[in-house]
Image (cartoon, rainbow, N blue to C red):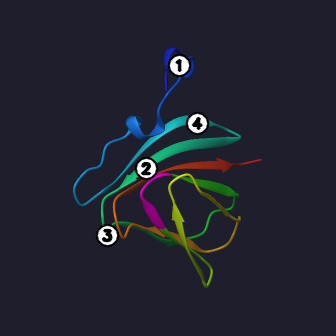
């Protein structure tokens, strides 16, 4: 992201558009210490179960997400957040279209 955009007020939902049958992402900040990425999930799309060596926070911008962490399942809606602990298997899925911001902390 360019420096000229960083100085503006942005609407996260408007930074990314849905694409039929896909998960779309756009990185907003990328630093050695962490990243901020926005995602748009079309209905029935998902990120399969995986682990990451860092803690992360998911903020649902619009819609509703199905988030699994280990054996627990959570329905997370617009305006809500969920923490994805480091080294815990997790997945994110869309029963309906939704957008989210992912903040990953690497230090």
Marker disc for residue 44: 3
Residue at x 68%, y 61% (from the top left corner): 53
Residue designated by label 1: 8
Q: Nearer the viewer, residue 29 or 61?
A: 61
Question: Disc 2 and disc 1: Cα gap in Å?
Answer: 20 Å
Q: Earlier in the sequence, mark 4 or mark 3?
A: 4
Label 3 residue SS? loop
Question: Disc 4 and disc 2: Cα gap in Å?
Answer: 15 Å
Q: Give, as a single range, the part of the protein colored magenta.
A: 61-65
Q: Is residue 31 magenta?
A: no
The x, y position of residue 96, in whole percent, is 34, 65
Residue designated by label 4: 30
* Residues at marks 1 and 3 touching, judged by CB atoms closer than 8 Å: no
The x, y position of residue 4, in whole percent, is 50, 14
Please tell me whether residue 12 is drawn above or below residue 78 in the rendered image: above
Judge from the rendering whether residue 87 lies leftward or rightward of residue 20; answer left or right. right
Question: Disc 1 and disc 3: Cα gap in Å?
Answer: 33 Å
Please tell me whether residue 84 is drawn above or below residue 60 in the rendered image: below
Please tell me whether residue 42 is drawn above or below residue 34 in the rendered image: below
User: Which picture quadrant has residue 15?
Assistant: top left
Marker disc for residue 39: 2
> Mark 3: few, some, or many residues within 10 Å (few <14, many ≥20)?
few
């Amino acid at each position: 992201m360019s420096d000229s955009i960083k100085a503006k007020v942005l609407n996260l939902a408007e930074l990314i558009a849905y694409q039929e049958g896909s998960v779309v992402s756009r990185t907003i900040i990328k630093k050695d210490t962490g990243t901020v990425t926005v995602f748009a999930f079309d209905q029935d799309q998902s990120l399969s179960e995986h682990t990451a060596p860092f803690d992360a926070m998911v903020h649902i911008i619009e819609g509703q997400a199905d988030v699994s962490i280990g054996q627990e399942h959570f329905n997370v809606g617009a305006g809500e957040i969920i923490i994805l602990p480091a080294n815990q298997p997790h997945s994110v899925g869309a029963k309906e279209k939704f957008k989210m911001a992912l903040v990953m902390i690497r230090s």
